[in-house]
Image: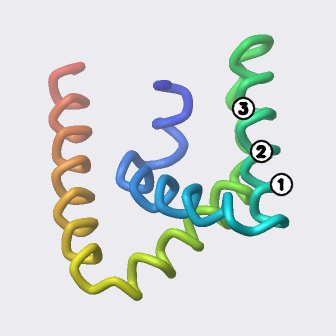
Amino acid sequence: VKMFTDQIHISMLPLFLVGSWFALKDKTLKICLLTFIALNLINFLTTRHPGVTARTFFLFAMIAGLGAEKLLKWNKLTGLYIVSAVFLSGIQAYSRILDF
């Protein structure tokens, strides 16, 4: 998990989750989501190398972009995302301060 969160900020998680939900309804995006999951699972089980994870960033960006589009259409959830992103960012920064 640390390998993944060092490369992609944790505040992207809500966008990815919402995008994943809507990606399951579209055939092309479902393939992107399943490819992303499969490649990361294979990397996690075999090599655990950050460079291998980097090749799946475009899939992550497509799914998170879909999530951002859907969240911006729902005004109430946009505020919830902003609050959760700031909160998660603060937790991540605080945990890194404690590591030093």
Residue at 73% from the left image edge and 56% from the top image edge = 59
* In the displayed structure image, the side of residue 99 where residue 51 appears, left or right: right
Q: Which residue is mark 2?
A: 34
* In the displayed structure image, the side of residue 23 where residue 18 appears, left or right: left
Please, what is the three-letter code of the amino acid marked with disc 2? Leu
Q: How many marks?
A: 3
For marks 3 and 2, give the one nearer the viewer. Answer: 2
Please, what is the three-letter code of the amino acid marked with disc 1? Ile
Q: Are marks 1 and 2 in contact (CB under 8 Å)?
A: yes
Q: Which residue is mark 1?
A: 31
**Residue 51 locus on image (x, y percent):** 75, 34
Q: Residues within 10 Å of mark 1 (few under 14, many from 20)?
A: some
For marks 1 and 3, give the one nearer the viewer. Answer: 1
Helix or strand or loop: what does disc 1 sit on? helix
Helix or strand or loop: what does disc 2 sit on? helix
**Residue 89 locus on image (x, y percent):** 25, 50
Q: Are marks 1 and 3 in contact (CB under 8 Å)?
A: no
Which label number is shown at residue 40? 3
Q: Quadrant of residue 80?
A: bottom left
* In the displayed structure image, the side of residue 18 where residue 25 appears, left or right: right
**Residue 93 locus on image (x, y percent):** 22, 41
Q: Residues within 10 Å of mark 2 (few under 14, many from 20)?
A: some
Q: Mark 1 or mark 3, which has the lower sequence index?
A: 1
Q: Is residue 85 above or below residue 94?
A: below
Q: Quadrant of residue 21?
A: bottom right
**25 or 73, which lies in front?**
25
